[in-house]
C-alpha cells in the first residue's frame, strides 16, 4: 500500500506551493542516488518523493488526489504512467541538482573550467620580514594559439552535437520519472569537433612553462597561501582558466625562532659576565645591531625584551618584539690557576652569593627529615 503523499513529503494537507518545493528540495537532496550510490532503499525513497511532489505540485492532480486518493491515478487516470510530459520536473530537478550534475556549468556555454594549480615556495625569515617580489616558473596548460582555444582546425569550427542538439544534456525516462544526464557524445559541451586542431588535438590548450611574478608581502607566516586568480590551468576549448595558489613555507633560521610576530634568540654569555654584569650586541632583522645590558647577578634563562624588533604583522602597522634569552655558560678546560681561583671563590662564598641553590637544598633537607618523624 502506497504511503500518503503528504506524509511522504512531511507537509500538512494545506501546504502551499512554496512549502511543497522546500520539503521536496530537502528530501531529494538527502535521498538522491548520486549521493547514495548503491543504496536501493534510498533510490526507492527518492522515487516516492518525486511521485508525491509531481502529484501535489499540479493543482489538478492534487485536487483529484485530495478527493480520491491514489485511486485517482489507477487504470490510467489523469494520464499517468507514461513518464512526465513537459519541463516541470526537469526544471525543478535542474534547479536543485544543477551543481551535482554540472547543469549550471553547461548552461554557461559548455566550457570546462581549468584546474587550479599549487606551487610550493620556500622563503627565508629575512624575506618574510621585508617582503619580496619573486619569479616562479610553472608548467601548465595554456590556450592553444593555433586555434585560439576552440579545438578546431583553423578555418573550421565546432559543430552542434547531433545527440543533444547543442543542449549538452539528454533526458532518459526511468519508470515514473525522467532524469537528465550529461550528453555522452559531447560531454556536456553542446558541440563536437569533426576536424580537430593538429597542435592541441582538439583540446584547445597546450602545455608549456610560464614565468610569473609573485608579490610576497612583509609579515607572511609559514603556511600562508597566495591566490593568483586566472593563472591556473587553461580550460578545455576556451573554457575559463583555474587559479594558481602559492603555498609559502619559511626556512629555519640560524639564530631566531618565530612565534607569531615575536622573535626569540638564545645568547650564551660567560659566567663572569652573568655574575659581574656586562653587555653584548645582537643583530636584528631590520639590519641594525642592538646593545643588550646584562645586570650583575643575571641568572641562566633570563629574558630581555627588545620592543619593535620582531616581525611585522601582515598588512598591519604593528611590529612584534624580540626576546633575548641568556644561557650562562660554565667554564671548561680550566687551567690550574683558574681552578685554584674558583676553589678559593667557593671557600669564601656565603649563602647570599647563591640564594636559590642554598634555599633549594635547605627545603629538600626539611622534606627528607619529615619522613623520619
Image (tube, rainbow, N blue to C red):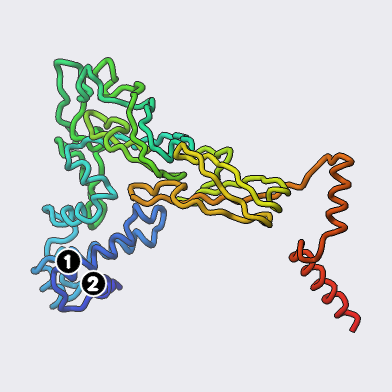
Describe residue 349's horizontal placement relative to residue 304 as left or right. right
Which residue carries the number 1 mark? 55
Dot 1: what SS?
Answer: helix
Q: Is residue 32 above or below residue 309?
A: below
From the top left corner, tell me how far across and down residue 133 is, in percent: 35, 31
Q: Nearer the viewer, residue 234 or 84?
A: 234
Q: Nearer the viewer, residue 124 or 210?
A: 124
Q: Where's the N terminus, which quadrant?
A: bottom left
Which residue carries the number 2 mark? 5
The residue that appears at 19% across and 69% down in the rendered structure is 20
Q: Residues within 10 Å of mark 1 (few under 14, many from 20)?
A: some
Q: Where's the C terminus, which quadrant?
A: bottom right
User: Is the C-beta separation of discs 1 and 2 under 8 Å?
Assistant: yes
Q: Nearer the viewer, residue 330 or 98?
A: 330
The residue that appears at 39% across and 49% down in the rendered structure is 313
Q: Say which mark, if any, is on residue 90.
A: none
Amino acid at each position: 500500500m502506497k504511503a500518503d503523499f503528504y506524509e511522504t513529503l512531511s507537509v500538512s494537507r494545506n501546504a502551499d506551493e512554496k512549502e511543497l518545493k522546500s520539503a521536496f528540495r530537502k528530501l531529494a537532496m538527502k535521498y538522491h542516488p548520486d549521493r547514495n550510490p548503491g543504496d536501493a532503499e534510498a533510490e526507492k525513497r527518492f522515487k516516492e518523493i518525486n511521485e508525491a511532489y509531481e502529484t501535489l505540485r499540479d493543482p489538478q492532480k492534487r485536487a483529484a488526489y485530495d478527493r480520491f486518493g491514489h485511486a485517482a491515478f489507477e487504470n490510467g487516470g489523469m494520464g499517468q504512467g507514461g513518464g512526465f510530459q513537459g519541463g516541470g520536473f526537469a526544471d525543478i530537478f535542474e534547479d536543485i541538482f544543477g551543481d551535482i550534475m554540472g547543469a549550471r556549468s553547461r548552461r554557461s556555454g559548455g566550457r570546462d573550467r581549468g584546474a587550479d594549480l599549487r606551487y610550493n615556495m620556500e622563503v627565508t625569515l629575512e624575506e618574510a620580514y621585508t617582503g619580496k617580489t619573486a619569479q616562479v616558473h610553472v608548467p601548465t596548460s595554456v590556450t592553444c594559439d593555433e586555434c585560439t582555444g576552440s579545438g578546431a582546425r583553423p578555418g573550421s569550427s565546432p559543430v552542434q552535437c547531433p545527440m543533444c542538439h547543442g543542449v549538452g544534456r539528454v533526458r532518459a525516462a526511468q519508470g515514473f520519472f525522467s532524469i537528465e544526464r550529461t550528453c555522452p557524445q559531447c560531454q556536456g559541451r553542446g558541440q563536437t569537433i569533426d576536424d580537430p586542431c593538429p597542435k592541441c588535438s582538439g583540446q584547445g590548450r597546450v602545455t608549456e612553462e610560464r614565468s610569473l611574478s609573485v608579490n610576497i608581502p612583509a609579515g607572511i607566516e609559514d603556511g600562508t597561501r597566495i591566490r593568483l586568480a586566472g593563472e591556473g590551468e587553461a580550460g578545455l576549448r576556451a573554457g575559463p582558466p583555474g587559479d594558481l595558489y602559492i603555498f609559502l613555507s619559511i626556512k629555519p633560521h640560524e639564530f631566531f625562532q618565530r612565534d607569531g610576530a615575536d622573535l626569540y634568540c638564545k645568547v650564551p654569555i660567560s659566567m663572569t659576565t652573568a655574575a659581574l654584569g656586562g653587555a653584548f650586541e645582537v643583530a636584528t632583522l631590520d639590519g641594525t645591531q642592538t646593545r643588550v645590558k646584562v645586570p650583575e647577578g643575571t641568572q641562566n634563562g633570563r629574558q630581555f625584551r627588545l620592543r619593535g624588533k620582531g616581525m611585522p604583522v601582515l598588512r598591519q602597522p604593528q611590529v612584534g618584539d624580540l626576546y633575548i634569552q641568556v644561557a650562562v655558560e660554565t667554564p671548561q678546560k680550566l687551567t690550574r690557576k683558574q681552578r685554584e681561583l674558583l676553589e678559593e671563590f667557593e671557600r669564601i662564598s656565603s649563602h647570599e652569593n647563591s640564594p636559590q641553590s642554598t634555599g633549594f637544598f635547605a627545603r629538600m633537607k626539611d622534606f627528607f627529615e619529615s619522613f623520619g618523624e
